[in-house]
Amino acid sequence: PAGEDVFRMLATSAGGAAKRGEPFVVCRNVQKSYGDRAVLKGIDLTVARGEVVVLLGPSGSGKSTFLRTINHLEPMEWGEITVDGRHVGYVPAPGGGLRSTGGLAKARADARIGMVFQHFNLFAHLSALENVIEAPIRVFGMAPDAARELGLKLLAEVGLSAHADHLPHRLSGGQQQRVAIARALAISPKLMLFDEPTSALDPELVGEVLQVMRKLADAGMTMIVVTHEIRFAREVADRVVFMDEGVIVEQGPPSEVIDDPKQERTRRFLRVME
Ligand code: ADP
Ligand code: MG
């Protein structure tokens, strides 16, 4: 189907199959505090091109902060993050600490990271299609006709062709979240970050969103997904990372971390989840 080609095209334009498996997101000793409270206490994580990493952890463990840091939405105090070889906003400064690499908005646009949040935050006064093509046109200067064409393909891919002209309030939560995924994909991201994309949905709408994410993963997109959907993690993740209190406690394939966790903290968390 034509749709599947769009996901695959996006995933491969993000680096090409030849580079699959190379380190793509490299985080070293990432530290971040809010006031006195240390929230990220030295995170080391490397995500390979084409890899799907599911980040698990209790509420307050720093998962969202970590994603936002990767996506230039939060400054860090210490450490280093590169995405596709590019420093994320900050580089180590001589004498310690970090200095900004310059215009954050530009760095954000250059990095081509797509992010999907728990709350879809669609523009209420724009149609589904207009939501999808807003950034390509306004931020990336794409020609409106080309953006429209891409937007319609993406909406088809997430199963919403019939809803292109609808305003968000006419869509269900699951449909709105699928628009949000199409919108994130419209900037041709090299990396997709998902922060609990199904947590705000009624249970019967969760599956349709996970299905789109699964298709994207199958197409080869590099993804970091925060979710409490253990089954999704087990079936789709190449690697599961369990985080607690600002540190990575344990990581590995789902068969190890979910089905045979080594750490007591991981076991305790999974007992509550399942
Ligand atoms: P998670 O996503 O794993 O639930 P968060 O990254 O949202 O965790 O939060 C980690 C910790 O940082 C929590 O204690 C939270 O209260 C705190 N925190 C998050 N965002 C802010 C903020 N903007 N200002 C102050 N504290 C924050
Ligand atoms: Mg969170």
Image: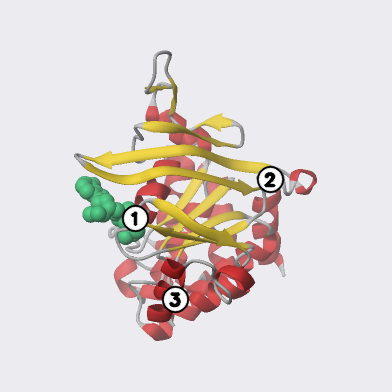
Q: Residues within 10 Å of mark 3 (few under 14, many from 20)?
A: many
Residue 90 sits above or below residue 215 on the image = above
Q: Which residue is mark 3?
A: 270
Please state which of residues 32 and 172 is positioned toward the viewer in this rendering.
32
- In space, the residues marked 1 and 2 are separated at their CA atoms by 36 Å
Please state which of residues 210 and 142 is positioned toward the viewer in this rendering.
210
Residues tagged 1 and 2 counted as in contact (Cβ below 8 A) = no
Q: Secondary structure at mark 1?
A: loop
Which residue is depicted at the point 54% across and 68% down?
Answer: 262
Q: Amino acid at mark 3?
A: Leu
Q: Secondary structure at mark 3?
A: helix
Residues tagged 3 and 1 counted as in contact (Cβ below 8 A) = no
Please state which of residues 42 and 240 is positioned toward the viewer in this rendering.
42
Q: Which residue is mark 1?
A: 245
Name the outermost residue toward the left.
35
The spot of residue 57 in percent (x, y) is 40, 64
Residue 48 sits above or below residue 227 on the image = above
